Image (spheres, rainbow, N blue to C red):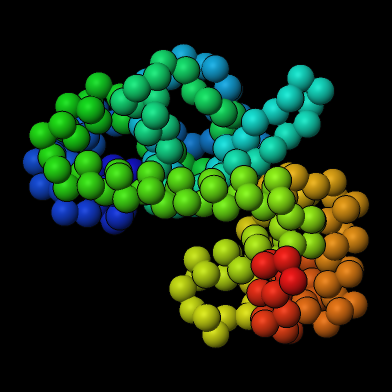
Amino acid sequence: MDVLKQMQKLDLFQGVPMEKLKTLAERSRYRTYKAGEMFIVEADPAHAFYVIVTGQVKLYKSSPEGKEQTLYLLRPGDPFGMCTAFAIDSFPANAMALEESGILMIPGPVMEAVATGEPRLLLNIIQILSDRLKESMILIESLSLKEIPQRLASFLLHALTREGDREINRLELTITQRELAKILGATPEALSRAVRKMSNAGILTMDGRTIRILDRPALEELAEGE
């Protein structure tokens, strides 16, 4: 794989001079992980910066009893591990490939050295961190203050917004319903009941991983708790 060519396509590296990208590319490692393969375990020693090139990865926490809470779904172009690359020595969550995924790993000291002398790269990182913080706050609010139908409505609206078109009312989930339940902090059975309730109310239909929004205003009202 041409690492440099892949980097040029990523938002993270937009505006970064070519010589700086070449430095990062020369010191990077690329590896492919199978679906279901965990490649970072919480509290593992880590001092690296990762970027998803292909596939999909989830970051999640797990309790001693085995209960999981998915924190974030990462798609191609998404970086992670920024905290361990610049600050702490252990990773704060688990990372698992949900499908075959190609991951680019940049050693922390290399990323830090380049970012220190390249303001555009630092600005790109700050923008990504700001977006992540906003999404984390939304997730915390949803899990602590909302019932499962409201959580699902909020998730769907957020997913539709990421598509960038308010006219879109059809969503293809890239994850299973079981994984969606983990994101929402619900059991698969509770999620199924919420979907059935929303379907009976004429808000949406769900066929496998395809969700069609039939009444977007009603979905927005439900997300707001009305």
Q: Is 137 or 162 nearer to us in this picture?
A: 137
Q: Position of residue 155 (x, y in %)?
A: 65, 60
Image-quadrant location for residue 50: top left
Residue at (71, 51) in percent of width and height: 145
**Residue 198 in view (yes/no):** yes
Q: Is residue 151 left or right of residue 25?
A: right
**Numbered disc total:** 0
**Which of the image's four quarters has the N terminus?**
top left
Quick check: can you spot residue 34?
no
Q: Nearer the viewer, residue 200 or 32?
A: 200
Q: Nearer the viewer, residue 52 or 69?
A: 69
Q: Is residue 175 above or below residue 169?
A: above
Left or right of 139: which side holds 195? right
Q: Which residue is rendered at x = 52% and y = 70% of the image?
A: 161
Q: Where 11 sits versus 164, above or below? A: above
Image coordinates for residue 216, horizontal then vertical, percent: 67, 81
Residue 13 picture location, percent across and down: 24, 49
Q: In the image, 204: left or right of 14?
A: right
Q: Is residue 21 above or below residue 44?
A: below
Query: Could you tell me residue 41's position as x and y percent?
Result: 58, 22
**The C terminus is located in which quarter?**
bottom right
x 26%, y 49%: residue: 124
The quarter holding residue 202 reads bottom right
